[in-house]
Amino acid sequence: MKSSSEQQQITNWFDQTYRKKGDRYLRDVRAYRFFPSVLRLSETDSLLDVACGLGRLLQAAKETGCSISGVDISSVAVEKTKKLFPNDDIRVANAEALPFETGSFSAVSCLGSLERMIDLSAVLDELHRVGNANARYCFLVRNSETLIWKWFKQRLGMRNHAGHQGAKSFHEWNAIFISHGFKIEKVLHDQYPLQRLRKILSFGLLQVDPCKVLESRIPIQRTGKFIYVLSKVT
């Protein structure tokens, strides 16, 4: 691990955030139901959610009947999540060294956190390692090629350094995932903003199916965040 002091700073930031904001830091729980759908989870699957936070994705995954495990660097988040899932494997752990045997899971997820990792290469090697030969992966990652990131986060100094906030372009993420042994099955627009927009435009009258893939007129290279669905290169 590159820097224990830097890692501790990030851990402290997340502990404070989860302690002060709690659920208000996260998306609506219904938004997480999309991810078990795109991962095609069923009762025969075992899911590991890395950077599981307060367990929103785990809640949605549990509805499919699959077995769930989660890790997070924040002990505050893990303590809260373990109260929701007292009989499941929820641990404090750094994603650079996951406490699981090779090939343990049929599905692995990491939402909104890869761009915050200090040693992304080590993390991706670990995510690849703990998935079995036929594992499905789902990652939600930030795009660096947006006006919000380039102007507000970078030029105006609004980037969250304490939380190690980062971003990469569409082509950069593609190259990184491929170089770590992943096969890109599909890349989707972040669904949550599209779901919210559809609801707003219908004045709240339209019931949005959280599992349905919504299309956007914005080119995928310009969307705020990408949803990657991947498998292992065979």
Image: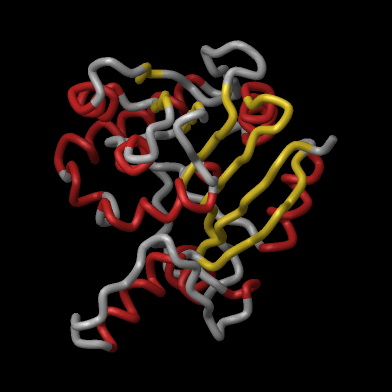
Residue found 25% across the figure and 24% down from its top = 85
- Residue 92 lies in what quarter of the image? top left
Position above or below: 114 against 169: above
Q: Position of residue 234 (x, y in %)?
A: 85, 35
Please state if 127 lies on the left or on the right of 16 as rendered. Answer: right
Residue found 60% across the figure and 11% down from its top = 101
Please state if 233 lies on the left or on the right of 121 as rendered. Answer: right
Position above or below: 197 against 193: below
Position above or below: 158 against 201: above
Q: Position of residue 39 (x, y in %)?
A: 54, 46
State the scheme by which the image is colored: secondary structure
Q: Position of residue 201 (x, y in %)?
A: 28, 88
Residue found 54% across the figure and 53% down from its top = 141
Q: Position of residue 98 (x, y in %)?
A: 54, 18
Please state if 82 lies on the left or on the right of 124 as rendered. Answer: left
- Residue 82 lies in what quarter of the image? top left
